[in-house]
Image (cartoon, rainbow, N blue to C red):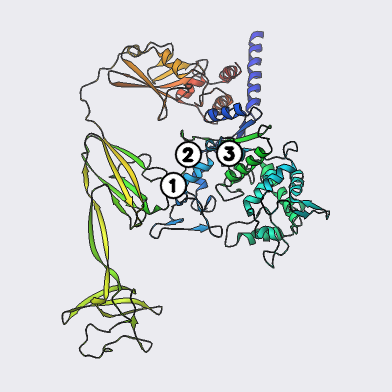
Amino acid sequence: MRVFLKRTFSLVLAFLMVFSLVSFIEPINTEAAASQYVSSTVPSVYKTYINALKKAHPNWKFEFFYTGLKWSDVIAKETDPSVPDRSLISYVFPKSYRSIVSKSYNGSTDTYTSYDAGGWYMAAAETVSYYMDPRNFFTDVDIFQFEKLSYDEDIHTIDGVKAILKGSFMDGKKITNTSNKSILYAQAYIDAAKHSNVSPYHLAARTIQEVGKSGSGSTSGTYSETYKGIYNFYNIGAYSGSNPIANGLKWASQKVSDPSKSYGRPWTSQYKSIVGGATYIGEGYINNKQNTLYLEKFDVVGEYNDTSLYTHQYMGNITAAYTEGRSVYSTYKDLGALDNAFTFVIPVYNSMPSKISPLPITADSPWSWLKSLKVDTYTLSPSSTLQVTTNNYTVTVPNSVKKVTISAEPYYSKATVSGIPVTTTTSVADTGKVVNVNSNLRVRTSAGVSSPDENENRLKYKGEYVGIKNGTAIKKLGEQTVNKTVWYQISFSYSGTTLKGWVSSNYIEMDTVTTSSYSKVSLKEGKNTYNIKVTSPSGSSRTYVLTITRQEAEDTTPPSEPTTNTDLFSTKYKVDEKNKYILSVSDKTSYSSFIKALGLTEGASATVKDGKDAVTKGNISTGMTLTVTKAGIDYVYKIGVIGDVNGDGETNILDIVKVRNHILNTKKISGVNFNAADINGDAALDIRDIVKIRNIILA
């Protein structure tokens, strides 16, 4: 009895220890798909890059902010067409960086909708993906957009601020502080840092990012009579609209009775704006968990109002965190401080793409882009919704399909498409224009004239004869032949009114309409490649490569199935033939060790995949698939690694959380993941499995 009580007490104590260990993992807001938390453990998706930075800079520290958000959901939200100014790209970047969703781009006129008083456009999903993918910025130069932005007097000096302000309208200039003392702008930013607990380097760089090196109406104090003597160095409140500067100055001029919300407003001096604005930034962002340039731009925290993600974003400019981070890097480099003890906070997303997100292919205009590419009703890969970054598409059809129709629609209606069989038909439209007229074309009330009188049957409007000039657009309503001359009845716009009348067809040039129909193409077995070229009227072009694979004819010879798995391998691992599982694989088993331990029989070969990606190195993780091929037949098994419950390739606290949630009926574990969690093999998950996982972690 005493032994039983002692064992029971030990189990309860272990449960309490584990529960206390994971109890900090709580949701930050209701929109997050999973818990958000910070860890010092480098996630596998970043390990190669972070280890290289650590090796080059041993004093640097890294924290990893697990957002609990799915990557594709984040990109969809940041490019939501209903909020087009959430992610903006400047006019200085290639047009391919801009969004071409319906509200942001007109394909018939090749025009984009501009935002934020002009010069800014909704960014394409590919552009947003590039600037949001942390892996693009794991370099000495770009890492500083992830720097923790709290003030550190050992790192942040007035000389550093001076370096950032160099060449700007604040370089070497003085202003008056609240004690009526003349001080340098650089000192004002140091004062602001001490008051707000925000890095002065960040504050100085933020000002230049917002108003430019020459300053703007936000910093002049003379923007308008309405806001004379008002300053807004960080453009706070300067939301998108016809006059964002005025919007920001209005905000800066407001007198708020509540001291906790006034931030020293109205900002009637440069100093008040710099210090008061820093307090706003600290309270609203940096001291509120949006504590890096990246998290200020991309609100994947949702902490500010506890309910909504993506809404509390300091700037619309998609490149802001990138450019400001580079400015901070330059300052640290000039100061010789790059090897100081910095801390960087890196966001982590669920289901990130295996490949680093690229920038869109550089192109001047969608005039030479395809809007759609179709092969009958088959689905293209990567997607039938064409991407700016992708020129190559594939599709597989059954062997029974010998012919298909390829259709390709350009964004710009006047672009031409070649490389696939197209039948073109030209017809006359019912619209046109006036031509061949020296002055004005006389419009008649009826077809034909019977006398030399030039004003016979002339159409009048408000008592005056109607005449129309070359280039006037018309619509043909009918026609009639009089004395071998064809007359058109037309409608046209005249002095803001639509009139009808008759004119000789000799003075009308009708428009033509070209329609295209696509012919079927024959497919051989195997790969069929088509180079589809889109050419704009200006001559610019883009080529899309479409590969259609027609499957080989099936071998109708019945395969010979192995009677047992021993015909495939003689392994030490536990094999569940019913469910097709390979189990009891040890934690941190490498690919090469796993293949060796399979003990493949003669003539058998094996491949391991993580989703669609082939695995040839690194460690084996739960959920990977093993395919053993013998005699031309594939035998597929799911792999279960002891303790790796969530399949991320590591046995860690996340796996304990998974088991805890299963025990508490929060979220059940199934399939091979259940077997990976069932360490003691009793077909049930309980505290004993949690303790065993903990022991693996601590081993």
Q: Secondary structure at mark 3?
A: loop
Q: Secondary structure at mark 1?
A: loop
Decide if residue 126 is in sight here.
yes
Q: Is 543 positioned to the left or the right of 350 in the image?
A: left
Of tags 2 and 1, which is closer to the observer?
1
Q: Which residue is mark 2?
A: 357
Image location of residue 648, percent across then percent down: 51, 27
Q: Residues within 10 Å of mark 1 (few under 14, many from 20)?
A: few
Q: Residue at x 32, y 22 (%)?
A: 634
Q: Secondary structure at mark 2?
A: loop
Return the residue nearer the eye: 383 or 218: 218
Of tags 3 and 2, which is closer to the observer?
3
Q: Residue at x 70, y 49 (%)?
A: 280
Q: Which residue is mark 1?
A: 362
Location of the C terminus (image quadrant): top right
**On screen, residue 7 above or below 609:** above
Q: Residues within 10 Å of mark 2 (few under 14, many from 20)?
A: many
Q: Earlier in the sequence, mark 3 or mark 2?
A: 3
Give, as a three-letter code, the residue at label 3: Asp
Q: Residues within 10 Å of mark 3 (few under 14, many from 20)?
A: many
Q: Which residue is mark 3?
A: 142
Image location of residue 15, percent across then percent down: 63, 21
Q: Earlier in the sequence, mark 2 or mark 1?
A: 2
Q: Earlier in the sequence, mark 3 or mark 1?
A: 3
Give, as a three-letter code, the residue at label 2: Ser
